[in-house]
Image: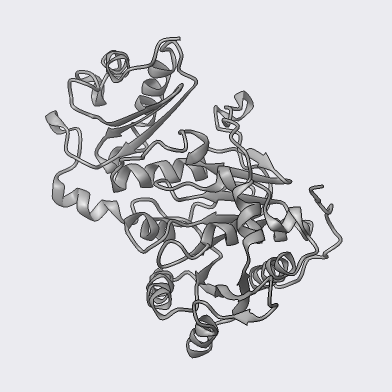
Amino acid sequence: MSEITKQQVLDALSQVKGPDLQGDLVSRDMVTEIVITGGNVMFGLSIDPNRAKELEPMRQAAERAVSEIDGVDKVMVALTADKAPTNGAAAPASTRASKTQGAAPKSGAIPGVKHLVAIASGKGGVGKSTTAINVALGLAAMGLKVGVLDADVYGPSLPRLVGHKTLPQQDPTSEGKLQPAEAYGIKVMSMGFLVEEDTPMIWRGPMVQSALQQMLNDVEWGELDIMVIDMPPGTGDAQLSMAQQTPLAGAVIVSTPQDLSLIDARKGLNMFLKVSVPVLGIIENMSYFICDNCDERHEIFGHGGAKAEAEKLDLPFLGEIPLDKRVRERSDSGEPIVVSDPDCVHAEIYKNIAKQIWQAIDGKTATASAGPKIVIE
């Protein structure tokens, strides 16, 4: 099978009429940031953000046109307001700047999903994604129906964490929505399922925001008690837009004990507070290390900084997670510690954190024996 080219995509899109049936998408300079990986094609259409709902049929026509290219398996089309195409297809720059943040109303909950909780950090490298998947599995161990969205478009890690690379399929019974992948009894979705692991996503802010909203709203999540959103690290435009546009029940901040990490954690915490998202608590990851040889405790990154910060801000301290190579090894192999060694101390810590999160948003503790116990031999 020959490789799909950008020119083939442009040729297909040149057959699709532009807004108001004037010209075509290519001649009106509306096509942005084409990404092709294997049989998956992703691109943006730059439009006036005020006409997003009205131009949805145009987006669908573009999706159909590209899907007919020989060898194409999946097409993702994002409506963006990243640049002003010719012939007035997009809003003026001054208007676009104000529309980028909070372009979609926050009131639109995902059908069937009761609660959405963000797992966030002010910086990368603190173990946020490992924490997110293990907390999600801890929630599932309580008998809850759980989904996980990997919102880190630039560095998606969920497929590796769950050992899953199956391409999500469209469900003909749900208006073409994607079916999320399933792993260890939870539903999962990530940009990493749509692109190869070493493919860089060279997308600007509006494209990322549109892709995230599609992964939230164009996926058939079904009935979920809770969706855990593994947020991108930091406090940039994508993070702020997710916090503003998504009806979050709350956010959890992950930090290491060291001062540099806590400085960034405060930024993430304050971002959620400024957009009126409750902060459910703080987790101290890599809190200490127990040596295999001497059995002594070593506080490599310091200790207690996150707990002190939580007390200072009058927020719940959800727990401290030790640094342990087994957690890293199980994560790298796609067998998270909560399901691969459910009775170990680390799994118990994650499950205890999960119980506290559920109690904070639902007001009651689910029964630990309500669901099946998943064990990997």
For residue 292, above or below residue 41 = below
> Residue at point 85% right, 58% down?
370
Q: Is residue 347 left or right of residue 311?
A: right
- Give how far across and how far down residue 29 sits, in percent: 18, 27
Of residues 165 and 185, the one nearer the viewer is: 165
Q: Is residue 114 visible?
A: no
- Give how far across and how far down residue 109 sits, in percent: 54, 52
Q: Quadrant of residue 6?
A: top left
Of residues 316 and 333, the one nearer the viewer is: 333
> Residue at point 43% right, 69% down?
272
- Give how far across and how far down residue 295 sits, in percent: 70, 77
Task: Identify the image's colour scheme: rainbow, by chain, secondary structure or one colour.
Answer: one colour
> Residue at point 36% right, 39% down?
200
Of residues 82 and 35, the one nearer the viewer is: 35
Q: Is residue 49 visible?
A: yes
For residue 67, above or below residue 281 = above
For residue 128, above or below residue 80 = below
> Residue at point 72% right, 46% down?
184
For residue 312, above or below residue 84 = below
Q: Is residue 347 left or right of residue 33?
A: right
**Farthest residue in the bottom direction?**
312
